[in-house]
Each structure stands twice: as structure tokens, then as C-alpha cells.
Amino acid sequence: MNQYLEFAIDLADRLQGQTGTNPSVGAVIVKNNRIIGFGAHLKKGESHAEIQALKMAGTQAEDATIYVSLEPCSHYGLTPPCSKAIIDSGIKSVVYAVKDQSLKNSGHEMLQEAGIEVSHEPSERAQALYNSFFQQQNTKLPFVTLKISTSMDGKVATDAKESKWITSKEVKQDVLNLRSQHDAIITGGMTVREDDPLLTTRSEELKDPKRIILTQQSDFNEELKIFKDENNPVIVMSDSNHFKVNENQNIEIVNKEGSNLKNVLYQLYEAGYAQIMVEAGPTLVSKFIEQDLVDQLIIYQAPKMIGGQGKYQYYQTNDVYPLSNSKLFKIISTEIIGGDLKIILRKK
Ligand code: AOF
Ligand code: ZN
């Protein structure tokens, strides 16, 4: 793989979780083996990656090559088409990693028709970056990742509800990084009331996700830690029409129908949240799995057997289904982190 294209993909990769319903894209402009410009799409509504890079390159862009992680756009959206800006700049050739399936008119063709040399250099890493974006374009739902920390026997706590800590501290750090790569974290009211979590990245260097609480009740104790961060208000979606907010609580939106999960996801996508991670207890986790709303599972499994009567087994259903109705996933990758197993699975 070309090193400049790798750099463009690195930029895009690093910006996951901050571009909302737009894809994260990186662009690098090279002339005579020197980088003369680079850029990234930082936020929905702002300039695309190519435009930022062209701004840096200025008039030097003439006869240069631009490397982009995604096919340049050809449409007037919130911003004018990148392909037009590339043509106007005098760039000689364009290399991109992933075809933008969401475009009505191909940027590739528009560039080629203007006499620019265009090549598509497929990259698995970049493709993986955009698969969730293409899926969202079809479903108008966020891409949902469910994160679970469990034992070998599938428990998230002992039957006496002791859960700190099942997995290692290295896993904890990995989870903080994961949080920063998501637009939002969904949790349940029960988890907030009982565990008093923060759900931030606890780091000056990492972007915090928006925190969303689904609850069936009508208020929260204002002392809970999640409400203390003034710079990051919480979204509450409640089933109660009369949800009460205290003065000291940083709550941004109170919405009803917090238990209709598909509707919750539609509303969140509309509000611009495209990559969502669910970190919750067995009740909410089980609803997401049973209703087929999980696109990706990230399971951290400690080499321990906890035992008990299965009270805090993470997936529980009232109905007993035939084995042929099991929820099916495929394993994407496995890794050992701090002695625990990290398994990434996708919906089959
Ligand atoms: C690019 N470069 O950096 C990005 C692209 O509403 P707009 O104008 O921001 O357009 C959003 C669409 O543009 C988005 O759905 C995707 O197809 C493409 N994103 N394209 O050439 C970029 N972010
Ligand atoms: Zn564009």
C-alpha cells in the first residue's frame, strides 16, 4: 500500500467518532515526493478533507497527486463538490481507497471526464472504516456496538452483584479508547442508579462521547456522578411523560418512549449520532440482542469461572427459543489484552 494513502487512512481512522453521520476522511497532496498539503474532515457541516488539503497546498497543487481515504464527492451537499475543487486546482492525479457507495453520481467519473488520472487502490483497513457509514446510509439507524466485560461462564457479576473487576486494567484502558471512538454511549437507568458510572474517557487527550440514559422512571438523584460534568450534558430518554429535572442536573434533552429501542435509535440518528456503543446491564443488553439491534459485539472475556445461578448472565430472555433461532454472529477478530480475550463479532 502506498505510504501517502496509508497516511490519509490514518487521519480518517483517528477521527472516528467525531464526524457524526458523515464519514471521517483524510487527504494528502504530494508533488515530487514531498507532501505539500494534507487535511481531514473534522466535523459534519465543515470542509471536506480534500478542501482542507488543497487550501494548504495552494497554487502548488498544480500537477500534484492527491491521496484520499474515500472517493471524492461530486455533489452539492452541506459543502460544494470536492471533485470540482480538485479539477479547478490543476491536480494531475487522484488515488482513493474506498468507493463512496452513497454517491448518486460518481466522483471518479467526474474527475476522469475532466482528464484527471484516477485510481482506486482498495484497502481492507479503509473499507472496514466505512462499512458502518454505508450501512447507516441505507438504514438511517446508527451503527450499534455492544460492549460486554464478562467471565468465561458469561457472567457480568456474581449473584451477589459483585462486579469490580472481572476483566483486567488493560481492558479498562481499551474500553476508554473505544468510548472516544463513538459519538455516544447508551446506558440504562438501573446501571446509572446502582453503579453511579461516569461513562467518560477520563482523559484530557480523548474526546468524550455523548452519554445517553434510557429509563422508565421519572427522575434521578442529582448527586449521581454522570450529571456532574457541566461541559458534557446527558441526554435522558424516559418512558415517563413527567420526567423531573433538578436545577443542578446537566440534562440536555428529555424525550419520551425510552423503551422503544428502535425508535430511540432513529431519533438518535436524526440528532446526528451515528456510532453508538451500548454499555449497560443484562436487562438492556438482552433487549438490544433479542430485538436484533446489535451490529457489532465487543466481548472482553476474563479466564475465570464465576458460578452461581445465572443471575447476572448477560443475555437472558423470558422465552426459550429453539436452537435454530439463536442469534448468529461471525467472529471478526480475537486478541489477548492484559490476559483477557477480546472478541469482535458482527451480525451474520
Ligand atoms: C469527500 N470528502 O471529506 C467527506 C465526504 O453534506 P456534505 O457536503 O458534508 O456531504 C456529505 C457526504 O459527502 C457524505 O454523505 C459522503 O458521501 C461524502 N463525504 N466526501 O469527498 C470528505 N467527508
Ligand atoms: Zn467532498
Image (cartoon, rainbow, N blue to C red):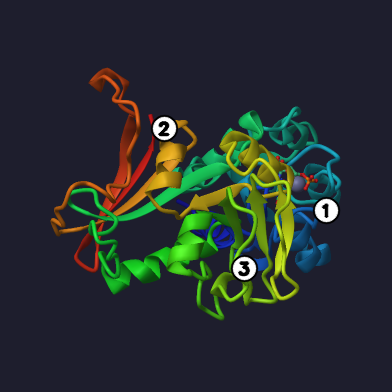
Q: Which of 2 and 283 lies nearest the eye of the viewer?
A: 283
Identified by mark 1, the residue type is Ser
- Whichever of labels 2 and 1 marks the residue nearer the N terminus, that label is 1
Mark 2 = which residue?
A: 290
Please tell me which of labels 1 and 3 falls first in the chain: 3
Of helix, strand and loop, which one carries label 2? helix
**Foreground: disc 2 or disc 3:** 2
Nearest the viewer among 337 and 239 is 239
Q: Which mark is residue 34?
A: 3
Secondary structure beneath dot 1 equals helix
Q: Which residue is mark 1?
A: 89
Asked whether disc 2 touches disc 1, contact meaning CB atoms under 8 Å apart, the reply is: no
Look at 34% across and 26% down and name the residue there: 319
Asked whether 62 or 272 is in front, the reply is 272
Q: Is residue 295 visible?
A: no
User: Marks 2/3: CA distance?
Assistant: 53 Å
